[in-house]
Amino acid sequence: MFGASGVSECVKGRALKMNFQYKLVSSMCKVFSGGENINELKEKRLTGLKGETVSCQVAYYWGEDRMERGSLTVLSPIKDRVQVRMVNLVPCEYPCHMKRDNGYLAVEPGMYPDWLSELPKLGFPLISGQWRCLWVDVELDDRMQAGEYPVKLRLEKDGEILCEPEFICEVLCAKLPKLPIPYTEWFHSDCLADYYQVEVFSDRYWEIVKEFVQSAVKHKCNMLLTPVFTPPLDTAIGGERPTVQLVDVEVSEGKKYSFEFNNLRKWVRMALDCGIEYFEISHLYSQWGAKAAPKVMAVRNGKYQQIFGWNTDSAGEEYQEFLHQFLTALKVELKELGIDSRTYFHISDEPEKEHMENFRNAWEGVAKDLEGFQVIDALSDYDFYKEGLIRQPVCAVNHIGPFLEERPKKLWGYYCTAQYMDVTNRFIVLPGCRTRILGVQLYKYRLDGFLHWGYNFYNSEKSLYSIDPYRCTDAGGAFPSGDPFLVYPGKDGSPEGSMRQMLMDEAMSDYCAFMALERLAGREKVLEFIDEEKITFDEYPQEESYLLGLRRKVNQAIKDALKG
C-alpha cells in the first residue's frame, strides 16, 4: 500500500497521497513540527542485548485542514515487549545561552519535542500542517530467545490504514552487563512533595518518591542523593527549601546531640528495593564556597527549630563539633545497614579558586571522621586536587583536560548549564547524538562515575519559587531548557519520561555493550571501533550515523565472538 517514500498512495474513499507522510527515524532524531532535518533510518533494524531497551520513532505529517486522531496497533510476535508513546512538544523559552557553538538545532524560543506520554485513549493527534512523532521502545527481556523478530506498526484513522512502518528487532544471545560505574541524577524529593502537595514523610510521599526512584533505576541510574539534611543546593543565600531531612536530631545540654535514623533506614530500604546500588550523602556545607552550614532542624528545649544554616560559620567550633558527633553516629548506622562501603560523601558543590581556603577548612574539619569513606565533589579547578583537598574529583567535561593529563586515581565527570560549548550535554535543542555520545566518552576515558544535578528539579534558579515543568523547562529562564530535569511529574504520582531520559539510557547501554565486547574480545577491540573517528570531550562526530554504525559493529563483534 505504501511506496518507499513513506507517502500514502490511497485510502478508501479519497486520495491522501499528498496529505499524509511518514518516516521511520532513529531515537536520536528530534522531529520539529516544521519537519526540518528528518533523516530516515537507512537500516530498518534494531539490535540489542538481552536486558536492553532499543528505540526508534515514527515521524508523521498530516496535511489535511482539520485536526484528526489516529490509532495504533502493534503487529509482532513480541508485541508485549513493544511500548509506543507520544512525543510531545514542550515550551522552551530559554533554549540556549547567548554564547554557544553552531551545533544547536534551534536558538529561538519555541515548542520543541521532549516529553513522552502514553497514547491517549481517544487516539494520537494528527495536527494539521505539522510533523509529529511516536516513540517506540522494545524491551529485550532476559527471557527472550535470541533471534530476529518482525515488528509492524499500523497507523489508522477511522479504520483506514495510514501507514505500516516495519522493522526487524534482533535480540543477541548475550546479556547486557550491569553499568559498572556509579551514575547519579540528583533527586529532589522536596520538589515532589511541593508539586503533588503531599506532606513530607507521609505515606503518599513515600509512594511517590519510590515511583520516581524506580524510573531512575530503570534507566540506568544506580546512585541516589540521600538527604540526611535538606540538601544545600541551588538555594538563594538566606533562602531555604522545604525540609526533607531524614535524620532526626535532638539537642541536649552541654552541646550534646542525639540522632534518630528511622527515616534514613526507610529511605535506604526503599532505594535498595528499587535497585539502587550506591548512596551519596547530601553536602555537609553550603554550595559555591562552603561558607555556611546546610539547614539543620532539631528539637531543642522541646521545640522543633533550625539550629544551623546560612548564619552558621562552617568552620566554627559549634558546627564542627556537631559534624563530628553526627558523622560518628552516621558511620555506625551505615555499617549496620550494610552500605558503608558504597556510600559517598560531599563537602561542597562547585567551589571556585577563591573558595579554596573555605573548602580547605571544611575538608580538614571532617577529614578524620570521613577516613576510609569515598568523598566526591563537582569542581573544575585542578588545584583543588593538587592541594589534596579532593580525592575523587567530579570534573566538568569542558575542564577535564588537566585531570586526564595528570590523572587522579579516580575521576568522575559531570555537566550542567555551564557546559554549553562543543561538549556533550542534554539540552532539549541539542541533537540527540550529542547527548548519547557520553557513553563512548565515559568508556574511552575510563571515567569512574557520572553526575548530573537535576533529575527532577522543579524550581526556579536558586529555588525562589516552584514551577510547572510542563510549562517551564528552564528554571524560570535561568538554564537552557532540559537542564533542570529529566522526567515530568505525571498526574498519578508517577513520572513521565522524556527523549533525553531515553538518550541517557542509550548512552549508558552503549557503555555496557562496550563492556560486554571487552569481556569477549578485549578492550583494544572496542577502542578499534571507537577510534575510527576522533573522540575527545570536545571533538567527536556530531552525526547519528557514527553511533548507529559503532553499535552495529560492536553488536556484530559480540555475535561473532559468541559463535567462535
Image (cartoon, rainbow, N blue to C red):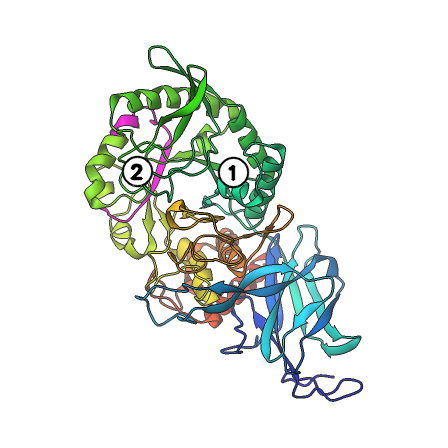
Residue 216: where, in percent of width, then height? 54, 47
Residue 366 location (% of width, % of height): 30, 27
How far apart are labels 1 and 2 at the CA level? 21 Å
Label whose residue precedes the other's in the sequence (1 or 2): 1
Q: Position of residue 484 (x, y in %)?
A: 44, 52
Relative to 356, is 441 on the left or the right? Answer: right
State the residue in front, 453 or 277.
453
Question: In this orientation, which residue lies closer to the viewer: 548 or 324?
Answer: 324
Residue for point 73% across, 68% down? 72
Question: Which residue is tagged 2?
Answer: 391
Q: Which quadrant of the figure contains the C terminus?
A: bottom right
Q: Is residue 190 left or right of residue 370?
A: right
Q: Secondary structure at mark 2?
A: loop
User: What span is in magenta?
Assistant: 364-382
Q: Amino acid at mark 2?
A: Arg
Toward which corner of the image does residue 346 lie, by quadrant?
top left
132 vs 27, nearest the viewer: 132
Asked if the residue at tag 2 contacts the one at tag 1, i.e. Cβ–Cβ closer than 8 Å, the answer is no
- Per the image, is 61 magenta? no
Q: Where is residue 263 drawn, in percent x and y?
A: 53, 27
List the residue tagged with mark 1. 277
Q: Dividing the image into 4 quarters, which one contains the N terminus?
A: bottom right
Residue 442 left/right relative to 558: left
